[in-house]
């Protein structure tokens, strides 16, 4: 029986898409499966593969069943294919096909555009696991180690989600693309991952938290707009992925928040008022706030680049064809076609930054990036509340979106974090105050010593306020395998 | 004054504003502005759909209030308000007959039962009278010898693709078909599952029960007469405390009579599947009238003694002195004492109400012999989720 809400375990691949009666796709996925398992096993250090990790797994895609917690060895995690329930009579929410029934099959004319979007999304999922592969060795606590692995197994599942769509709807091309997702590898010279930001190693835990806060949030925005797709299987896939993505946002926001908390507590305890008294603060075994701000500057701006050009015909085409919507498309009150609407984007005229109205259709990327910035600013405000509560005088801020950019209208020019245009020399003279230096990285690295006692945390990070699954403070989130 | 009511609130200091709860809420009781995510007390119907989807735990907060906080109040919050002093009558058991039944079954523990800290989180109340799950009978085997007047059955149920995630120690309800004298559908009867979480057959997620035929018992006769292929209506799963710890270092002492062995069969099978190489961490004390009436006597003998020590007590075996489970406990006083003192020691009691007193007395005597106070130990163990009683 397959009622498309509950997860069926009647094949090797847990799913709610009736795989057991879809022999062609089942066979293709079973053929792809060993390659995936090899990829996972080669990636994650052996001792973690054999440890018992307190993970959540979905037993159904409705709210009651999708977060079951238990100890699992990661290679036994039930990666599967899970789609949110089909909405009856769903309509295409945007573009020239607005109001027509959502597609259940790939529309021929948009086939290659759809495939490309799915491949790009799919490529980021295994990439982040690759980037984070060595972090387990320096986890500041078992709690954090568990959170890392939860993020990793779910990114793995998101790869499955995209691979399913490729196998199910794109025939031979899809199979080849699916194989390539395992062939490319983050940071590889011969076959790197598709997007630049996904080829850098995540060197330390503060970078990991910043990455999950800022870069995974780009992923969340992309998923939000793909969840609005007129191609219903893609929409349903992304809607379920978003529930998982929320956990990744949580790891990032609370990770940075707990780092800030510990720094402020240590400063107060040592009687240090000046947040810029960096050597004294670092001597306490915590990361000074200005360095955290520098990490924020770096990760926020790298993530902004992921949104592409401000004005883009590709984005316009994807929207107009109903393949990709806007953030919360269904809640926006307009004609959802954008035939005559305009949107303000940044431009550069006579040596000055100006806001310029362009056809809204071409500004889809810019709009999504603005939604992203608003979403990202919320967490920064909550970090500031943490600082304020401890009594330390310091405020974190998002830099201006022109700062440190490689893609779009700001690329090739140098701006200060407040948006002032600078000469290259002026920028170089100050960049050490704005972006983390190698010495900053070395200092952070020096704090990265693993803590494996239940309930204990490394010097630089505060314990969480609430345990996962409401577990008590000294809960053993990972039972480490002792070889 | 209004009757105090329980209000669902969200902790703004822990919430990360992912709005997943808002998407999950089927009655649109949750909304947000630029500051907070809030719950409309006039709409929230406590369906709990928002609880598991929250990544932070901020969603799981409640205040008993005379007048509910308005949306505007909640939008202003920087932190949750303290619980005000209000006399709450929080007796949920009165409203829910299943919860009342379980509370009664657990009463022998002497206080509010708690689950072991490392127990997996159970799913409960997924199916109810209004929306039962349908299972197919795939097996019905007599466990007691044909000559015995005690008819205990091993029933195997298959849920097809339907999820019925049930942990060892949890129960499910079976609804006997037909109507009672008032023309209403029968209430479900509770039975402990005797299969582990991944299924009677590993990975198949089928469920087994251990059911004794009671004279004039409406439901037990219905179940014991089921044939392969018959359809059965189930409710549940139920029970959130009588669960096993996930910690492989935990030592379990399991004391049972008759069909009280059902949860312990599940415990044992789960341990065997998860940690087959463990030694000496399980002890089973099992009482029956005679070996022929002891459910699973055959399969039990095949479990290696190194994996689980088995102490049988027979009260009507011809030619032998009458023995009850409490006698076996006294024989093994040293082992029982070690377990009482071990922070990773767990005691489970399951069976007929009548066994409670004798077992409690034996545990009390054993403690006293070492100069310890059983009542104090019991309360501490219970608070710690290490002492569990389920008797009917």
Image (cartoon, coloured by chain):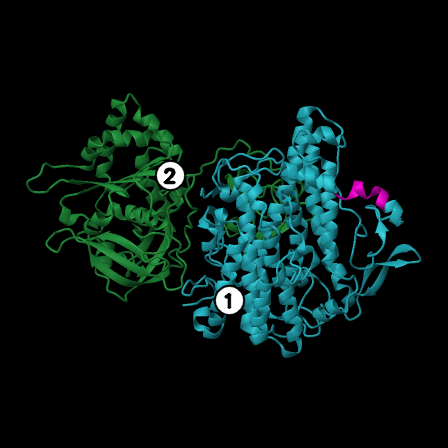
Chain colours: A cyan, B green
The x and y percentages for residue A139 are: 57, 41
In the foreground, A465 or A29: A29
Q: Secondary structure at mark 1?
A: helix
Q: Is residue A434 magenta?
A: yes
Task: Evaluate whether residue A75 shows in this view.
Answer: yes
Q: Is residue B325 magenta?
A: no
The x and y percentages for residue A45 are: 52, 49
Q: Is residue B194 above or below residue B81?
A: below
Name the residue furthest front: A190
Q: Disc number at residue A32?
A: 1
Q: Please identify the dominant SS of the magenta region.
A: helix
Please tell me how crowded label 1 is: few (under 14), some (14-19), or many (20+) other residues with Cα within 10 Å: some
Q: Nearer the viewer, mark 2 or mark 1?
A: 1
Q: Is residue B32 above or below residue A368?
A: above
Please give the residue where the numbered disc 2 appears in the rendered image. Answer: B249
Asked if labels 1 and 2 touch by Cβ distance under 8 angstroms, the answer is: no
Q: Is A471 on the left or on the right of B76, as rendered?
A: left
Residue in view at x 50 percent, y 44 percent: A469
The answer to whether marks 2 and 1 sit on the same chain is no
The x and y percentages for residue A227 are: 62, 63
Q: CA distance from mark 2 to mark 1?
A: 38 Å
Q: Secondary structure at mark 2?
A: loop
Q: Is A238 on the left or on the right of A438, as rendered?
A: left
The span shown in magenta is A428-436
């Amino acid at each position: 029986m397959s009622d498309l809400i509950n997860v069926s375990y009647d094949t090797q691949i847990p799913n709610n898409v009736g795989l057991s009666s879809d022999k062609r796709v089942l066979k293709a996925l079973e053929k792809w499966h060993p390659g995936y398992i090899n990829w996972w096993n080669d990636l994650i250090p052996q001792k973690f593969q054999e440890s018992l990790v307190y993970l959540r797994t979905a037993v159904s895609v409705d709210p009651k069943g999708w977060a079951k917690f238990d100890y699992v060895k990661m290679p036994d995690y039930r990666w599967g294919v899970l789609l949110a329930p089909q909405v009856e009579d769903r309509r295409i929410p945007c573009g020239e096909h607005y109001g027509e029934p959502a597609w259940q099959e790939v529309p021929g004319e948009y086939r290659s555009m759809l495939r490309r979007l799915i491949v790009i999304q799919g490529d980021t999922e295994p990439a982040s696991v690759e980037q984070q592969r060595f972090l387990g060795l320096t986890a500041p606590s078992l709690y954090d180690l568990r959170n890392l692995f939860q993020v990793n197994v779910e990114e793995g599942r998101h790869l499955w989600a995209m691979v399913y769509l490729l196998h199910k709807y794109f025939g031979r091309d899809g199979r080849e693309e699916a194989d390539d997702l395992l062939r490319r590898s983050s940071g590889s010279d011969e076959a790197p991952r598709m997007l630049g930001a996904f080829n850098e190693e995540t060197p330390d835990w503060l970078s990991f938290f910043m990455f999950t806060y800022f870069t995974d949030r780009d992923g969340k925005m992309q998923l939000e707009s793909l969840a609005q797709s007129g191609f219903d299987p893609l929409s349903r896939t992304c809607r379920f992925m978003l529930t998982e993505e929320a956990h990744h946002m949580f790891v990032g926001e609370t990770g940075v928040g707990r780092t800030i908390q510990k720094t402020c507590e240590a400063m107060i305890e040592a009687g240090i008022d000046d947040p810029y008294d960096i050597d004294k603060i670092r001597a306490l075994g915590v990361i000074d706030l200005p360095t955290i701000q520098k990490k924020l500057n770096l990760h926020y701006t790298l993530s902004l680049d992921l949104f592409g050009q401000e004005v883009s015909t590709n984005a316009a085409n994807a929207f107009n064809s109903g393949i990709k919507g806007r953030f919360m498309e269904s809640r926006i009150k307009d004609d959802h076609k954008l035939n005559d609407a305009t949107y303000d984007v940044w431009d550069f005229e006579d040596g000055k930054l100006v806001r310029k109205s362009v056809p809204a259709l071409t500004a889809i990327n810019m709009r999504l990036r603005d939604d992203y910035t608003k979403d990202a600013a919320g967490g920064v405000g909550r970090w500031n509340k943490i600082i304020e509560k401890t009594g330390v005088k310091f405020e974190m801020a998002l830099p201006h979106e022109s700062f440190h950019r490689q893609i779009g209208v700001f690329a090739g020019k140098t701006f200060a974090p407040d948006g002032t245009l600078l000469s290259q020399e002026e920028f170089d003279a100050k960049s050490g105050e704005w972006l983390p230096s190698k010495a900053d990285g070395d200092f952070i690295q020096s704090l990265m010593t693993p803590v494996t006692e239940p309930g204990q945390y490394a010097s630089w990070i505060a314990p969480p306020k609430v345990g996962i699954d409401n577990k008590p403070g000294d809960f053993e989130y990972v039972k480490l395998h002792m070889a | 004054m209004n009757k105090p009511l329980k209000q669902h609130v969200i902790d703004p200091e822990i919430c990360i504003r992912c709005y997943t709860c808002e998407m999950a809420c089927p009655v649109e009781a949750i909304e947000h502005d630029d500051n907070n995510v809030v719950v409309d007390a006039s709409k929230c119907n406590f369906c709990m759909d928002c609880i598991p989807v929250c990544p932070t735990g901020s969603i799981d907060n409640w205040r008993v209030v005379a007048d509910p906080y308005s949306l505007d109040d909640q939008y202003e919050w920087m932190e949750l308000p303290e619980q005000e002093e209000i006399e709450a009558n929080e007796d949920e058991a009165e409203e829910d007959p299943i919860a009342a039944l379980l509370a009664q079954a657990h009463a022998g523990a002497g206080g509010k039962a708690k689950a072991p800290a490392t127990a997996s989180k159970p799913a409960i109340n997924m199916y109810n009278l209004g929306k039962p799950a349908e299972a197919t009978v795939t097996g019905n085997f007599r466990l007691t010898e044909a000559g015995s007047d005690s008819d205990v059955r091993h029933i195997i149920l298959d849920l097809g693709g339907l999820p019925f995630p049930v942990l060892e120690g949890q129960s499910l309800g079976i609804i006997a078909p037909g109507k009672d004298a008032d023309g209403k559908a029968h209430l479900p009867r509770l039975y402990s599952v005797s299969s582990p979480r991944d299924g009677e057959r590993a990975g198949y997620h089928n469920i087994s029960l251990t059911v004794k035929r009671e004279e004039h018992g409406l439901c037990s006769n219905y179940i014991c007469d089921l044939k392969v292929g018959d359809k059965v209506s189930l409710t549940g799963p139920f029970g959130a405390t009588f669960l096993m710890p996930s910690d492989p270092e935990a030592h379990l002492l399991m004391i049972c009579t008759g069909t009280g062995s059902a949860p312990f069969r599940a415990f044992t099978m789960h341990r065997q599947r998860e940690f087959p190489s463990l030694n000496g961490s399980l002890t089973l004390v099992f009482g029956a009238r005679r070996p022929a009436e002891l459910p699973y006597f055959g399969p039990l003998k095949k479990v290696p003694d190194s994996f689980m020590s088995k102490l049988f007590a027979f009260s009507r075996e011809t030619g032998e002195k009458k023995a009850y489970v409490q006698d076996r406990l006294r024989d093994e006083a040293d082992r029982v004492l070690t377990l009482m003192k071990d922070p990773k020691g767990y005691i489970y009691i399951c069976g007929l109400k009548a066994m409670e007193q004798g077992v409690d007395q034996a545990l009390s005597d054993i403690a006293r012999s070492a100069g310890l106070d059983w009542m104090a130990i019991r309360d501490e163990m219970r608070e710690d989720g290490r002492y569990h009683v389920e008797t009917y």
